[in-house]
Amino acid sequence: MTNPASTYGGQSADVPMLFFSPGACSLASHIALEETGRPYQAVETLLSKNQHQTPEYLAINPRGRVPALAVDGKVMTENTAILTWIATAFPEAELLPEDLVERMRCIAQMAWFSNTPHIFQRAKFRPYRFVDREDVYDDIRAKAVSSYWECMQEIDALIGDKQWTMGDAYTVVDPYALVFYGWGTSNGLPMRDLASFTRHTEQMMERPAVRRVIEREKNPHFWSKRLG
Ligand SMILES: N[C@@H](CCC(=O)N[C@@H](CS)C(=O)NCC(=O)O)C(=O)O
């Protein structure tokens, strides 16, 4: 039997194969791979066209979510794991601190991104995953947006005067933070009022790897758009 993680849509995978959708949280993993300068294949899996629900993609990730990363015929899911793998597999890219406690602080921050602001974003766009009663969707959405905004303020305070999210060094936490700025802007939140987070995003936009990925994805939150 053909291993679905070795070939996909007729494409072979002798390099890491990233499944992404423009505008999704997979942007973080996409940027991190690009930052390594190592070869990889980016496979567009459009959520808008339900390409994450095809039998072929469900063989890659039975949860039907992006990102997924196939490496040597095996699949990893979850941004936090994929980003940690990228930083660990390509240490020369220096995408996570060597100090173990500092490294775990980065992983804890990514876990929080995934389990807190991302969940509020999901509640806004997919309230049907949280309640059956359609008449309370608007309440759920309103609370999700205000809770998301509190998370954005927390990220702004975390960055503070630091060069990058976790300190002086750029890490995989930075492209993950960028995802939330983009969602906040597209949700109509006053992201520009968050001075540190806005400075961070502007710095991100100066990085060639970030620009290349946004261009390749035609990322709806950043491509051809001014910030804020
Ligand atoms: N906890 C996962 C979340 C993955 C996730 O929910 N991805 C979204 C895109 S941002 C998705 O695939 N949504 C499709 C759906 O919910 O059906 C991670 O951090 O990687």
Image (cartoon, helix red, strand yellow):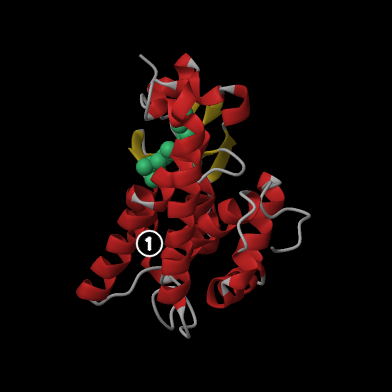
Q: Nearer the viewer, residue 113 or 68?
A: 113
User: In the figure, residue 189 lies in which quadrant?
Assistant: bottom right
The image shows residue 210, relative to residue 102, as above or below, that is above
**160 horizontally vs 201: left or right:** left
How many other residues sit within 10 Å of disc 1, few (<14), some (14-19) or many (≥20)? Answer: many
> Ligand 1 is located in which of the four quadrants?
top left
- Can you give x and y, in whole percent of width and height, for residue 15 in the image? 47, 43
Q: Which residue in the structure is indicated by mark 1?
A: 87
- Can you give x and y, in whole percent of width and height, for residue 14 in the image? 46, 39
Q: Is residue 192 visible?
A: yes
Q: Is residue 68 visible?
A: no
Outermost residue on the right side: it is 224
- Can you give x and y, in whole percent of width and height, for residue 105 in the image? 27, 69
The residue lying at 32 percent from left, 67 percent from top is: 106
Outermost residue on the left side: it is 101
The residue lying at 57 percent from left, 31 percent from top is: 45
Q: Nearer the viewer, residue 185 or 28?
A: 185
- Can you give x and y, in whole percent of width and height, for residue 87 in the image? 37, 62
Please state, as top left, top right, bottom left or bottom right, where the N terminus lies in the image. top left
User: In the figure, residue 122 lies in which quadrant?
Assistant: top left
**131 horizontally vs 160: left or right:** left
| Secondary structure state at the residue bearing disc 1 | helix
The image shows residue 88, relative to residue 63, as above or below, that is below
The residue lying at 43 percent from left, 53 percent from top is: 147
